[in-house]
Amino acid sequence: MKTDTAHVYWGTEWAKADGTTKWERPEAEVMDFAQSLPAGAAVLDLGAGVGRHALALARQGFAVSALDAAPEGIAEITRVAAAEGLTVDARIGMMTDLPFKDGSFDHVLSWNVIYHGDEVVLRETIAEIARVLKPGGTFLGTMLSARRVPVQLAKTPGREISRNTWVFEGAEDKVHPHYFCNGRDLLELFSAFEICRLEDREHETPGSWHWHLVLERL
């Protein structure tokens, strides 16, 4: 069973981009962390969507690459970058097979992305993030927390299709497989990294638990 399919849902969402949705506004946490990066740092926005972070970072002078599996998102990034005279290396691709050389980036950002799939997809993606980061390079990302599962089950029927991997009926993109993990599993998954910051917290809605990670490539 193919599990990295959520981009099919998100492609339809990116096609509706009109400048008004939260998916088009950069996260303060992402932009705050960017202030710690060297001027002109090479940054990969992995799962860039319509470019809310990639474009904002390019405006600040970073050397930005953006990758997403949904063509609709990459088309929007390319359109806006051209209109504003920005340089963004925007590519269509899967997170399990990054089209970049080893050690290409000082920083990889992946906000609400890499948990879209099962553990096989996740491990392949993490290995690719580690590969394209320079030694000492940083990763800022989010993961779904295991404590969100009972909250989601209270809303919609769901089933665990493989270890830590769930699908939920009628739950927008969560009809596609999503990976939820506890802290112990998370530390094992990211064993190639030094943990700089790790926090499990809610997002906008009650029960929307996500891990927030800042990691350094060993």
Image: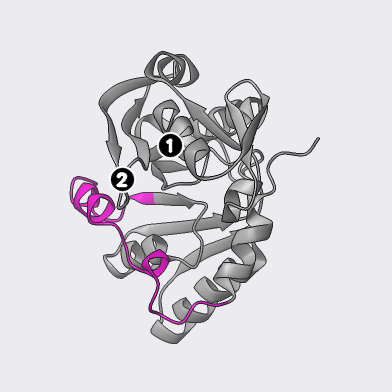
Nearest the viewer among 173 and 69 is 173
Relative vertical location of residue 198 with respect to residue 103 in this rendering, above or below: above
**Residue that extends furthest to the right in the rendered view of this protein:** 1
Judging by the rendered image, the residue that carries numbered circle 2 is 206
Residue contact between numbered discs 1 and 2, judged by CB atoms under 8 Å? yes
Look at the image and tell me in which quarter the C terminus lies. top left
Percent from the top left, x then y, of residue 53?
37, 61
Percent from the top left, x then y, of residue 40?
30, 56
Q: CA distance from mark 1 to mark 2?
A: 9 Å
Which residue is pictured at 26% across the width and 65% down the height?
60
Which residue is pictured at 66% across the width and 53% down the height?
93
Q: Is residue 103 visible?
A: no
Nearest the viewer among 163 and 50 is 163
Q: Considering only order in the chain, which callout, 2 or 1, is on the residue closer to the N terminus?
A: 1
Judging by the rendered image, the residue that carries numbered circle 1 is 151
Which residue is pictured at 24% across the width and 56% down the height?
31
**Residue that extends furthest to the bottom in the rendered view of this protein:** 83
Identify the magenta region.
16-42
Q: Is residue 19 rendered to the left or right of residue 4? A: left
What mark, if any, has residue 134 been given in the picture? none
Q: Quadrant of residue 87?
A: bottom left
